[in-house]
Amino acid sequence: MIEFVRNKSGSGTELKVGKGPNATRLHAHECWSLGLVRSGATRTEIGHRSFRLTAGEFIAIPARIPHLCTPESPDRFGFYVLYLDQALLTLHDKVFDHVRVGGTDEQTLLRLGRSLANHTPATDIRQEIGMLSKVLAGDGEPMVEGYTPVPPPWDEGDLSESNPAGANRYKAYRRSVKLYGLGPHAIKQNMRIEKAKQMLGKGLSVADTAAACGYYDQSHFVKTFRMYTGIPPLQYK
């Protein structure tokens, strides 16, 4: 069972709490995210680094940094994930610009997450962001060696597959991996899934979302969405 709490002001803030399977493909989000293990354990891969996280430990990941979490026992794995706008956080504190791993009190983070997910445009959330910053700075160690924090926004021009096969295509692939940590095809899939999540969150049907995101076969869309998010699109709505 997975619970979603989405901010209705359109800020992109989302809280996900639940138990069960995760994404099975290396992926990235257009927003900052913080994942906390509530039960069980998981192996999280970022770049060439791998972390084992157990109950009470978290990992904070800036926007567009590719990662993959693989629970050791999916049936026993409980998690909490908070998604927040990267630009909003960076305005407050640079601590949000790096991957950080640490441990903290689950209930503190859960209260902060629910408060942020339920804020309105008129709400001053500087206090909550300040508290979150203190959690990261006090309880988390930064992981910055060998990895560029906050890769640049995904650029459609960099992802063109119009190059002929051979050396030019391989050169484009290497450039994409160097810039973004993912190849052109993987980035395009991530962009489509991120767009689909936005549309589903606004109440669009699975069929309309699939078509709008370029999936002409709804079953292919459902399969791909599950690989990149861990859940079927109908459950995300």
Image: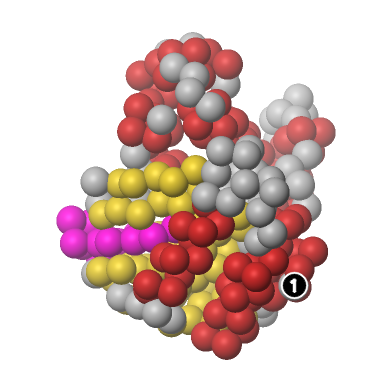
Q: Is residue 49 above or below residue 199?
A: below
Relative horizontal placement of residue 197, taking residue 206 as reference (left or right): right
- In-front residue for pair 82/76: 82
Relative horizontal placement of residue 59, taking residue 146 as reference (left or right): left
Q: Residues within 10 Å of mark 1 (few under 14, many from 20)?
A: few
Residue at (76, 47) in percent of width and height: 153
Q: Secondary structure at mark 1?
A: loop
Segment colored magenta: 70-81
Q: Is residue 203 above or below residue 94?
A: above
Q: Is residue 24 above or below residue 206?
A: below
Q: Position of residue 201 (x, y in %)?
A: 50, 31
Name the residue that disc number 1 marks: 93
Q: Is residue 40 shown to the viewer in this render?
A: yes
Relative horizontal placement of residue 195, taking residue 203 as reference (left or right): right
Amino acid marked by disc 1: Asp
Q: Residue 209 colored magenta?
A: no
Residue at (35, 27) in percent of width and height: 234
Q: Residue furthest front?
A: 122
Q: Is residue 215 shown to the viewer in this render?
A: no
